Image (cartoon, rainbow, N blue to C red):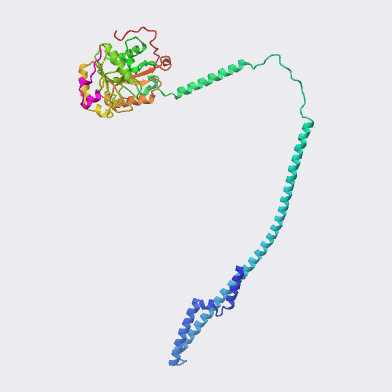
């Protein structure tokens, strides 16, 4: 419809092209007509003044004729353009009419195909219903046939056994034993590979380069460790272990007046070892003083039931004198300076010059000063204290302390200029240690003597 309207419009424009809208609205023709009017007025003035035969009148007439020819040519051009538009519109109308006729034919074919498809769908539905009905009838007939005549037949009659029968247990036991052994070995290897805890000084290997000073057996769970370390009168494996550590640390060629005992982390037996060494050294006849420098987590006063709250932290703050905090021990026992009340500013207190003054003072009074230090990896206090000691003993807990933790602790102490004498492994299970240790057997079977002797 739009194409036919366009063709009709092109035809009407062509018929009225002589003086139609297209000619009147043409800008070129309008300009030429304006020039023609101007030229006509000029020629009329010239004719009126000079006559029609005057050269200027003749030239004006020729110019008017040229402009008229240009107007005619432009009108012919517009007419040609309109004719071409009409031809194009009529061709488009013819093309669209052909397409419409083709689409009508396709629609007619599609209507026929749709009707055929609807017929096929109805046939399929009918055949499906028929198939379902036949399947139900077949199932019913098969059930009836099985009821009338069964499909089982008797091959032979069953015989009763004369005695009970069981599977053979021998092969089953052998297979189960082999599988259990394989699984147990695999689990043991995996646990051993995954276990990075320290079980001997060889576990540190080339990383530390320090010897093992000794091993301390595990104290029974029902006994408090610190009071046990304070009482070493009875011969035992623990007494022999402390004697060995004492000999390797304090009976050296060069005397060690100040000995620091520390560990990588808390709970690895440093306070236990410090008390045990102090007790054994005092029993050997030395004048011994133990100074508790773990100002944040003090434990010696409560474990040994020492009266008085004033301790090292109060002395470093200037609120207590040395005589106020020094607790003399009984005969054969060391003197003690406990930490006092817990102090959160322990690093600042131990960094004061008063602490070094205290050490110089007590060195004049005692043969040996044992310092119970905080752990190396938790606080910088141990690095400060290590620079004041003649030697440092590193404690580790057997099968609990991590090898990397102990190695880092030793490296930190060496960076601070400490003389690390060796490692003491505590809480050792004597029956398991020979599998991991350096070949030293437990002390059982050898005669023991008291610490006093």
Horizontal relation, residue 31 to residue 285: left or right: right
Q: Residue furthest top?
A: 447
Above/below status of 154 relative to 42: above
Name the residue nearer the viewer: 209 or 357: 357
Which residue range is magenta in the image? 310-330
Residue drawn 46% across the image and 23% down it: 191
Q: Going 21% across and 22% down the picture, which residue do you hit?
A: 358
In the image, 192 versus 135, the foreground residue is 135
**Farthest-out residue, right:** 148
Q: Quadrant of the C terminus?
A: top left
Residue 279 showing in the rendered view: yes
Q: Is residue 251 visible?
A: no
Query: Residue 263 or 76: which is nearer the viewer?
Result: 263
Report how many numbered discs are placed on residues in the image.
Answer: 0
Return the x and y of residue 367 as percentages of the image width and height.
Answer: 23, 15
Q: Judge by depth and name the residue closer to the eye, 218 or 177.
A: 218
Q: Is residue 94 left or right of residue 420?
A: right
Instruction: Answer with left or right where residue 284 lies relative to residue 172.
Output: left
Q: Quadrant of the N terminus?
A: bottom right
154 in the magenta segment: no
- Residue 428 place in picture, x, y as percent: 39, 17
| Picture quadrant of residue 359 | top left
Q: Quadrant of residue 131?
A: top right
Q: Quadrant of residue 414?
A: top left
Q: Position of residue 357 (x, y in %)?
A: 20, 23
How far across and how far down the image is residue 100, in percent?
65, 64
Q: Residue at x 58, y 16 (%)?
A: 174
């Amino acid at each position: 419809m739009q194409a036919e309207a366009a063709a009709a419009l092109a035809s009407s424009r062509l018929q009225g092209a002589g003086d139609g809208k297209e000619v009147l609205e043409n800008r070129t023709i309008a300009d030429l007509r304006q020039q023609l009017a101007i030229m006509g007025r000029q020629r009329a003035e010239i004719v009126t003044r000079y006559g029609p035969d005057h050269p200027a009148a003749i030239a004006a007439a020729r110019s008017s004729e040229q402009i008229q020819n240009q107007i005619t040519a432009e009108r012919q051009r517009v007419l040609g353009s309109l004719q071409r538009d009409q031809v194009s519109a009529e061709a488009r109308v013819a093309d669209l009419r052909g397409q419409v006729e083709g689409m009508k034919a396709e629609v007619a074919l599609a209507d026929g195909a749709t009707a055929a498809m609807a017929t096929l769908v109805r046939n399929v539905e009918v055949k499906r219903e028929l198939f379902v009905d036949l399947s139900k009838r077949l199932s019913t007939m098969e059930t009836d046939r099985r009821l009338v005549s069964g499909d089982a037949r008797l091959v032979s009659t069953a015989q009763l056994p004369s005695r009970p029968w069981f599977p053979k247990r021998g092969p089953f036991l052998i297979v189960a034993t082999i599988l259990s052994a394989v699984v147990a070995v695999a689990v043991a290897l995996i646990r051993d590979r995954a276990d990075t805890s320290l079980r001997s000084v060889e576990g540190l290997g080339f990383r530390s380069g320090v010897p093992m000073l000794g091993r301390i057996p595990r104290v029974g769970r029902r006994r408090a460790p610190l009071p046990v370390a304070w009482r070493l009168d009875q011969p035992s494996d623990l007494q022999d272990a402390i004697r060995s550590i004492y000999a390797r640390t304090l009976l050296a060629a060069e005397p060690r007046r100040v000995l620091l005992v520390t560990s990588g982390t808390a709970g690895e037996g440093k306070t236990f070892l410090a008390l045990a060494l102090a007790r054994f050294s005092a029993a050997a006849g030395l004048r011994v003083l133990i100074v508790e420098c773990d100002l944040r987590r003090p434990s010696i006063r409560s474990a040994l039931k020492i009266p008085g709250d004033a301790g090292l932290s109060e002395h470093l703050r200037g609120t207590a004198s040395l005589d106020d905090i020094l607790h003399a021990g009984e005969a054969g026992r060391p003197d003690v300076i406990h930490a006092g009340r817990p102090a959160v500013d322990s690093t600042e207190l131990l960094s004061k010059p008063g602490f070094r003054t205290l050490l110089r003072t007590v060195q004049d009074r005692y043969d040996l000063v044992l310092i119970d230090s905080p752990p190396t990896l938790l606080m910088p206090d141990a690095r400060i204290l290590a620079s004041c000691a003649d030697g440092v003993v590193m404690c580790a807990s057997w099968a609990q302390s991590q090898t990397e933790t102990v190695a880092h602790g030793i490296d930190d102490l060496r960076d601070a200029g400490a003389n690390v004498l060796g490692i003491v492994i505590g809480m050792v299970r004597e029956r398991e240690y020979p599998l991991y240790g350096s070949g030293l057997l437990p002390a059982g079977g050898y005669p023991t003597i008291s610490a006093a002797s």
